[in-house]
Amino acid sequence: MGIGAWREYGKPKRIEIYIRWTFYAMTVVLPLSMLPFAGQNVIRQSATPAVALLCGLVLLSSALSVPLTRAALNYHVRGGALPVRLLLAHTAVIQAAVWLPLLAAAHRAVQPTALLLTGGVLLNLWVVAPAIVLRPRVLAPWALAMLVLALPPFWIACRNLGFAVGQLVGLTFGLTVCAASCRCSAWMVKVAWDLDSARETQARLAVAEERLRFSRDLHDVLGRNLTTMALKAELAVQLARRGRPEAADQMVEVQRIAQESQREVREVVRGYRTADLAAEVTGARSVLRAAGIECRIDLGPDPAALPALAQSVLGWVVREAATNVLRHSEAEQVTVRLWTHQEQAVLELSNDGVRPPVASEGGSGLAGLRERLAAHGGLLTCTRSPERFTLRATLPLPNTTPDQELAA
C-alpha cells in the first residue's frame, strides 16, 4: 500500500488499518521472538523434542492469531458471526504450549525462566481476540480459568508455590492491561466508523429537511388556491349547464387565481434558487462546527456592499463547498475568504481534508457551480496540494445595486 492509496482512505479506514496491523504484528512477532530464547535455555538433550514441539505450537498460535484477530475485529465493528471455533482452537493451542514443557521442566531439562516467559507471553497474547469480542463478565471467568490451568506447570517449573502464585498475580495484571487496551482499541475503530456514518446521516437529513420545508411551503401556497379553483370551476360548470351568464365570471376568477398561484410559486422557487451570502456563510459555519470542523471566516470590510446578484451567486458557492466538505473530505479546518480585486469578487474556500483526485471528481455539484458562474462571466477553479484543497470562485462585479432583480 503506497502513500497515494493511504491518502485515498478516510480517517476511519486509516484508524482501522493501523490498529489491525498493530494487532497482527503483536500476535505474530512476540511469540516468534520467544523461539530463540526457548532453544537457548535447553539444559539437557532430552528436552529437545519438547522444545521443538513447543516451537511448533508457538508457530501454530501465530498462524491462528491473524485470522482470529481479523474475524474478531470484523465481528466487533460490523457484526456477523462470532468466531467461536477459532477462539476455542487458539485457546487449546495456548494451553498446550503452556503445559508442554512441564515434563522437561520437571526433569530440570529446561530453565524455568523459559517456561515462565513463554507461557506468560502466550497467555497475554491469547487475551487479544477474546477481549475484542467478549463482554467483561464473560471474559473475566474465562481468563481466570486460563490462569488456574496455568498454575500447575508454573508451580512445577518453579518448585515454589508462592513464587508461582506471585508470577500468576503479575500475569493477571498483564492480562487485565492487555485486555483493556485491546478492547479500547477495537472500540476506537467502531466509534470512528459510527462517527463517519453519523456525519453522512447528518448530511442526508439536512437535504431531507430542506425538501420537506420546500414541500410544506408549496402546500401552503397551492393548497388553498387549488381548492378554491376546483370549487369555482365546479360552480362555473353548474352555472353553464343552467345557461347562466355568471359562469363566465367564475371562469375569469379561476383564471385570476391560477395566475396568482403561478406568481406565488415563482416566489417560492426563487426563494430556494437564490442564496444570501451572509446567511449561507452563517449556516455553513454552524453546520461545520456541529460536525467538529473549525471554521475561519474573513469576508472583508463590507460584504453587504456587493451587488445582490453577486451575493446570490457566491452564496451558492459557499453552500455547495460546505456540502462537499461534509460529504467528501476529512477536514478539521475550513477557511473562507472574500475580497475584491480589479472589479472582481473573489471567494476562496480551503480545507485540510484533501484527498487524491478520483475518476468521478467534479460531480454534478461543482459542475452546476461552474455553469452558474459562467452564466455571469465568472470562473470556478479547484487546486489541491498535499495538505489542502482550495476552491476559488471569481465573479465580475456588474454596475448594479443591491436591489437589482435576481436572476432565476
Image: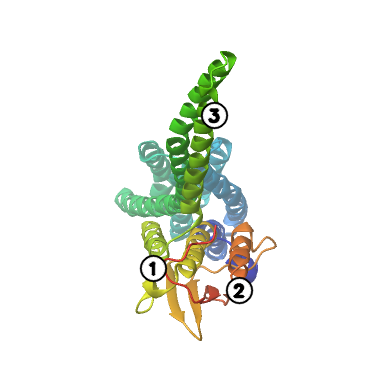
Q: Is residue 294 above or below residue 246?
A: below
- In the picture, measured across the screen, residue 307 lies left or right of residue 169, that is right
Find numbered disc 1 in the image and state the secondary structure of the residue it sits on. Answer: strand
Query: Mark 1 = which residue?
Result: 295
| Mark with earlier residue (1, 2) | 1
Q: Nearer the viewer, mark 1 or mark 2?
A: 2
- How are the residues colored? rainbow
* Residue farthest along the bottom direction in this orientation: 342
Cα gap from disc 3 to disc 2, whole angstroms: 45 Å
| Mark with earlier residue (3, 1) | 3
Which quadrant of the structure image shows residue 233? top right
**Classed neighbour count for the residue bearing mark 1: other residues with Cα under 10 Å, few (<14), some (14–19), many (≥20):** some
Quadrant where the C terminus is found in the figure: bottom right
Which quadrant of the structure image shows residue 45? bottom right
Query: Mark 2 = which residue?
Result: 377
Query: Mark 3 = which residue?
Result: 251
Q: Nearer the viewer, residue 328 or 31?
A: 328
Name the kind of residue labelled 1 in the image.
Answer: Cys
Q: Residue 157: x, y in percent?
A: 43, 52
Is mark 3 in CB contact (under 8 Å) with mark 1?
A: no
Q: Is residue 110 above or below residue 197?
A: below
Q: Residue 36: x, y in percent?
A: 57, 65
Name the kind of residue labelled 3 in the image.
Answer: Met
**Classed neighbour count for the residue bearing mark 2: other residues with Cα under 10 Å, few (<14), some (14–19), many (≥20):** few
| Mark with earlier residue (3, 2) | 3
Q: Nearer the viewer, mark 3 or mark 2?
A: 3
Q: Residue 223: x, y in percent?
A: 46, 32
